[in-house]
Image (cartoon, rainbow, N blue to C red):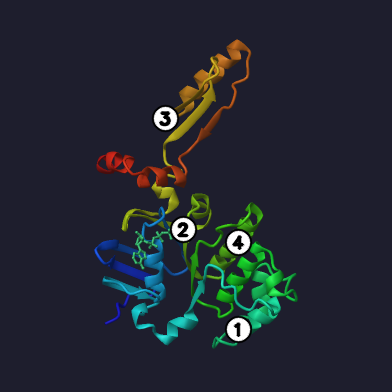
Amino acid sequence: MPASPSADIAILVRELRRAYGAHEAVRGIDFDVHRGEVFGLLGPNGAGKTTTVEILEGYRTRTSGIVSVLGHDPAQRPRELRSRVGIVLQSTGMYRHIGVREAVAHFAKLYPRPRDVDEVLALAGLGDVGEQRVRTLSGGKARRLDFALALVGDPELIFLDEPTTGFDPAARRAAWDVVRSLQDLGKTVLLTTHYLDEAQALCDRVAILKEGSIVAQGPPAALGVGSSRYRVTWRTEAGDLETRETEDPTALLHQLTSAALARDEPLRELSVTRPTLEDVYLELTAETAAEEVGSGG
Ligand SMILES: Nc1ncnc2c1ncn2[C@@H]1O[C@H](COP(=O)(O)OP(=O)(O)OP(=O)(O)O)[C@@H](O)[C@H]1O
C-alpha cells in the first residue's frame, strides 16, 4: 500500500534501509521534503546518498522502510511519476550529433505537457547556443543541456545528483541560478552535493548522511550557520595567527583594536566569522571527532 502523505509533502522517507549483502548502506533514515523546497543530501563518499536517491527515483530497490514520492511508491515504477519527476543524470551524452534546440524539442515530445522549448533553453541559459551541435558544447553548457532535458517535461519534482561537479566557478554560479529559478517556479528539488557552500547557498533544508545514518537535519542556519558562536582571527604582535571562539566578540575586539591603536600599528588579518555549514559538516562527519562531540551534543 503506498503511503499517503499530506498534500504539502513531496517526498516522505521512513525507516529506510538498504543492505548490499552483509553491508548496510542505508540504516533506517527518516526525512520529508516539502513541496517547493530545495532539499540537500550531503555526506562523504559512501555515506549512502546515491543509494537513497536512486531508491527515490525507482532505479534501486530498498530492503525495508516506507518511501513515497508525490504520493507513489517509486518501487512500483508508476507511469505517472515519469512525467512528474525530472532527473538530471550525471551527463547523458545523448544526441551528440544534433542541434541543442532540436534535442530539447525531441525530448519535449516524450511528455504529455511539455514546457515551451525556447523558454526551457532560456531557463537553462542556452538561449544563445540553440542552433549549435550538442557535441560542440563546453562542459558547463553540456551540463545545462542535461538540466534542460530534465526540465522540458515540466516536472514538479527534480532530482539533481551533484549538479555542479567539475564546473568552473562561473558555470557553478550559472547552475545555481537555474536551481533558484526552479525554486521561483515552485518546483521541488532534491539535490546531492559535495560542495557545502552550494548547499548553504541553495538549500532550504539539508540532511547530513554518515555511514548510512542521518547525523543532522534542518535548515543550514539551524545547523550552526549564523549560530551565536563567532570565530575571531588576527595576527599577533609576535607574528602568529591566533584564533579564538566566543559567544560575544565585543570585548575581545575592543581589546585588540585598542592595543593596536596604542602601538600605532594596524591589526593585521583580522576576521570575525561564524561557523559555516562546512565547519558543522566537518565536525559531524569527522571519524573520531564525531564520537567526542556526538554524546556531548
Ligand atoms: N551495488 C552495490 N553493491 C554493493 N555495495 C554497494 C553498491 N552500491 C553502493 N554500495 C556500497 O554502499 C555504500 C553507499 O554507497 P553510495 O553510492 O550510496 O554512497 P554515496 O554517498 O552516494 O557516495 P558517493 O558520494 O561516492 O557517490 C558504499 O559503502 C558502497 O560501497
Disc 1 vs disc 2: Cβ atoms closer than 8 Å? no
Give the image quarter of residue 7.
Answer: bottom left
- Residue depicted at x 40% and y 70%: 54
- Residue depicted at x 50% and y 18%: 255
Residue, disc 4: 175
Cα distance between the residues tagged 3 and 2: 27 Å
Q: Earlier in the sequence, mark 4 or mark 2?
A: 4
Q: Residues within 10 Å of mark 3 (few under 14, many from 20)?
A: some
Q: Amino acid at mark 2?
A: Asp
In the rendering, at what x and y percent does residue 252 appear? 47, 23
Q: Secondary structure at mark 4?
A: helix
Ligand 1 visible in quadrant:
bottom left
Q: Is residue 294 left or right of residue 130?
A: left
In the rendering, at what x and y percent does residue 47 appear? 36, 57
Q: Amino acid at mark 1?
A: Ala
Q: Secondary structure at mark 3?
A: strand
Q: Amino acid at mark 4?
A: Ala
Query: Looking at the rendered structure, which numbered label has been put on residue 108?
Result: 1
Q: Is residue 22 left or right of residue 163?
A: left
Report the front residue among 264 and 98: 98
Q: Earlier in the sequence, mark 4 or mark 1?
A: 1
Disc 4 vs disc 1: Cβ atoms closer than 8 Å? no
Which quarter of the figure is the N terminus placed in? bottom left
Residue, disc 3: 246
Report the front residue among 222 and 233: 233
